Image (tube, coloured by chain):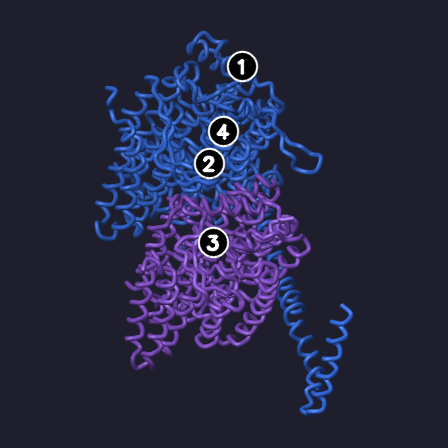
Chain colours: A blue, B purple
Amino acid sequence: MPDSFPFELVYLAIPLSCLAGALLAGLFGWKIGRVAAHTVTILGVAVAFVLSAFVVLPDVIAGNSFNGIVYEWGRSGGIPLEVGFLIDPLTALMMVVVTFVSLCVHIYTIGYLHDDPGYQRFFSYIALFTFSMLMLVMSNNFLLLFFGWEAVGLMSYLLIGFWFTRDSATHAQLKAFLVNRVGDLGFLLGIAAIYMTFGTLDYAAVFAIAPQMAAKTIPVLPGVDWNMMTLICILLFVGAMGKSAQVPLHVWLPDSMEGPTPISALIHAATMVTAGVFMVARMSPLYELSETALSVVLVIGAITALFMAFVGVVQNDIKRVVAYSTLSQLGYMMVAMGASAYSVGIFHLMTHAFFKALLFLAAGSVIIALHHEQDLRKMGGLMRRMPITFITTWIGALALAGIFPFAGFFSKDMIIEAAHHSRLPGSGFAYVAVLSGVFVTAFYTFRMLFLTFYGKPRMDEHTLKHVEESPWVVTIPLVLLAIPSLVAGFTFIDPLVFGRFFADSIKVLPAHDVVKQVTSLFDGLGPFVAHGLQSAPFLLAVAGILTAWLMYVRLPQLPGRVREKAGALYTLLLRKYFVDEFNEFVFAGGARVLGRLLWKIGDVKLIDGLAVNGTARVIGWVSGIVRHIQSGYVYHYAFAMILGLFLLITFFLHK
Amino acid sequence: MLAEHILSLVTWLPIFGGMAVLATGSDRHADYARQLSLVIAVLTFIVTLPLYANFNSGTHAMQFVEDHAWIEAFNIRYRLGIDGISLLLILLTSFSTLLVVISAWKVIEKKVAQYHAAFLMMEGLMIGVFSALDGILFYVFWEAMLVPMFLIIGLWGGPNRVYATIKFFLYTFLGSVLMLVAFIYLYHLSGSFDILAWHGMKLGLTAQTLIFFAFLAAFAVKVPMWPVHTWLPDAHVEAPTGGSVILAAIMLKMGAYGFLRFSLPILPDASHELAWLMIALSLIAIVYIGLVALVQEDMKKLIAYSSIAHMGFVTLGFFIFNTQGIEGGIVQMISHGFVSGALFLCVGVLYDRLHSRMIKDYGGVANRMPVFAAFMMLFAMANAGLPGTSGFVGELLVILGAFQANVWYALAAATTLVFGAAYTLWMYKRVIFGAVANDKVAALTDVTPREIVFLSLLALAVLVMGLWPYPFLDVMHASVDHLLQQAMTSKL
């Protein structure tokens, strides 16, 4: 590109084209109709994708980056608060992933919501979501990051409750918003801590002086000082735990499946839920300064990776299986972050975006073919009836399970190696968790695949007769996503992990640099693959697939027997460790009981009853007595006057 | 000529305008009364705009000052002037009154002229409060403003209006009398009622403390702060929609404004000594009231409690003594004017159709009123403090400020992120979402063009302030810096 190329306009055009589509479809959708509504939004996102992938990405690869403000939002105490963009390799990669998946989902929606009365509203929402997500990844400061962060949360809220007449959907959307708000509470306090420590919210300025602040402490209780950097990183991570659904703030994500499937693919698998992972990578210059915070990230990620995978094993709703898989995979990404393998985590974020969006959209394709049936127990035998969905699901499943040469093989293997080489407290547990998670992942993925496509059809006659492959608007996105699910691993591992694609956008201290340790073991990609094919993760994945095949294809009566033997464990998993019941009772119920107590006892009984009306009663009582003084006899009043005069004179004489 | 008396003009135009409306007489001429009120409200709003346009944001000095002798025997003067703090509140007042006039158009059918006249006169009196620079003048406006409000609640209010009015009156009157005593004491010390002279006057700690509590009695009731807040939910429930809008949008701001104009600059040492108390009461308002709001069954009560919690942010911001806190508090005052006004208007829109404010009588409104649902979603999100709406700006700044003062203040204040979202969106869910709940909901019709006008104006205000608060913050910097300097300078 020539030097005079107007990159700043391009950076503006990318989010604004999505916004324009959203506004047109949202405000004028009722007038311009369905076709026009999806045309303008798809056009907007397509422009954003083309510009991101073919203008911005090549430019950053060429070594250019941009950091500048768009406008000054406000100012307080002389410190400017700005809206500005930072375009570097990390951002550019995220922009391409977001716009690509979004584009696929936009096209897919034409088929998926074909008959829905809220068609235009839906397109407006997803375009607005894409805009918000772009603002999140493109921001150059914490303020705009928080804007994007909350805006994607809002769009998630609106889309989970898209079918707002369903109680389950409106319950799920409220739950999602509130759980995320708990995370955001931490996030906002983290931003306040940064503002206090650094006096600015600008990334570049914060990162530049962060090393000098590494030892700074803050008094939290008399005599108790905490390390500021650790506090900042943990508070920010609380935000990431909400957005990226890490235990114990994961509870909203499975319920978010109440939203239409395209949303599950776009927001609750590929993009928004990875915002927390992206944020930690973006903040790597801060996290590197606090090993405590990294350990927390590592352990929470590992817990999420393993224990959410277990739950996926017993779910019967096809979307919930994929949802728990997403939770588990987000845990994997967080493990990478905690191990300081930021580039690896982002690499997995990317491959996961492709294959998980694919699996969701494929699940959606099955769901519409079965007239909105989501229960795996009522599926089966769809292999020949839905060939494109079947093959693409296979590709997605192999990628998720981590089978060579599919994308997940490379990214997941790198995470496991990174956890293995990490020396932080908790890394031993994390390694065991992510390693055993591989078996579980392969098992639940193929359980789902086999139950859906193999065996005898278990749906009723009527449904079975009408099963057919989905229309091309649905299958084309599946194919579009299947391609990177197959090739993204071996194509991008070289630059992203072995190479220096991320350049300065990610910072790793030499002592934490596990990626370098791992890559130095191998002389390039070939030896890495050769090693991977003989190592434990690959063998565990194959074992998982074989077990699933044994249980759900070869010996279909086996699962029932296992279920009987492991009754308590099965119930524990089926009820998701009873976390929902706990939250519902303790937090939701507790807040209501407390609120009612404060209202009925505090406000009504004490303040109003005792203080206010009590005062009124006392005044009434006093005036009831004082009233007798006003007898109406002139000599009484005259006597009172003389008495008063006497008292006043005495007072002034003795002053 | 006009330029020199612009503050008098914006103060007295609506008052005399209100009298003119009153002169249209009985309900036979109701349409004249409406049209005339609209003209006066629009004119007043237009007249307030030059205040912003000609405002010099580079100085903290009072601007557009008018100064005439009034009661010379006591050195009481007719002295008006505004700084960056009062400017925004005056604009908010004229904007809100305009909305109230539009919103009452089809709704108020009895004693139309009197209703509109009350609002217009109240507008002038409230602007008077924000621009008075003389203690007695301030006090006169402050007390006079209550009269139209009593009438509005007492005449156009709900079934329990007498109880609510008396409770409102007793609470506010008791506080105001103590404030007057404090004014007279300050007059004895300084020989004048000049508020700015009081700012510069030396004062011992005991005197400061006593005056602080006298002021607190007046201002805390108005804000209202916990535990003198219980009049507000009752007053809101009984007030007609317009009354609720003005009460929430402007009247609550009087107390907060009092802290800025009187307590902090006149009593800096007492303010510091008693900051712990103010912060504690503010945090209680945020957390305790947040929980109470959660379990309300009446939409107006819920929004009233929400107002108390939001005003807790304002007082918290004022008493942590840093720029972010005070500017955040002021921004929150303005934003709360837009957002709570909007929410009360939304409840009014529903009430006009279904004649109930109870959450349980609704459900599935979005099926019948999609445009209304979209507006109310925006305002609900603004109430929950979503970035991009005005509700976020103040909360952000106050939390940034509070964190500098103490981590735990910030944590307690930030719980509003969860509580605010919980009570607002839970109400929204039960009222707007779901299947059509009953026949009455099924018969609802979507917003009329007139309703779209006032909802759009508020939506615009909420979004502009959320996306670009710069112009709002810009005018207040010099005044806030000066105020903070006064509050940090000991008078002992």
- In percent of width and height, residue B357 lies at 46, 67
The reply to whether residue B306 is in sight is no
Q: Do circles 4 and 3 both sit on a common chain?
A: no
Q: Do circles 4 and 2 both sit on a common chain?
A: yes
Toward the top, the furthest residue is A523
Name the residue carrying label 4: A280
Name the residue carrying label 2: A79
Secondary structure under the numbered disc 3 in the rendered image? helix
First along the sequence among labels 1 and 2: 2
Is residue A385 rendered to the left or right of residue A233? left
Secondary structure under the numbered disc 4 in the rendered image? helix
- In 3D space, how far apart are the residues under numbered discs 1 and 2 (Cα atoms)? 34 Å
In this rendering, the answer to whether A60 lies above or below A225 is above
| Subunit of label 2 | A
Name the residue carrying label 3: B333
In this rendering, the answer to whether B29 lies above or below A487 is below
Is label 3 in contact with label 2 (beta carbons under 8 Å)?
no
Is residue B334 rendered to the left or right of residue A26? right
| Subunit of label 3 | B
| Subunit of label 4 | A
First along the sequence among labels 4 and 2: 2
Secondary structure under the numbered disc 2 in the rendered image? strand
Q: Nearer the viewer, mark 3 or mark 1?
A: 3
Within 10 angstroms of label 1, few (less than 14), some, or many (20 or more) residues? Answer: few
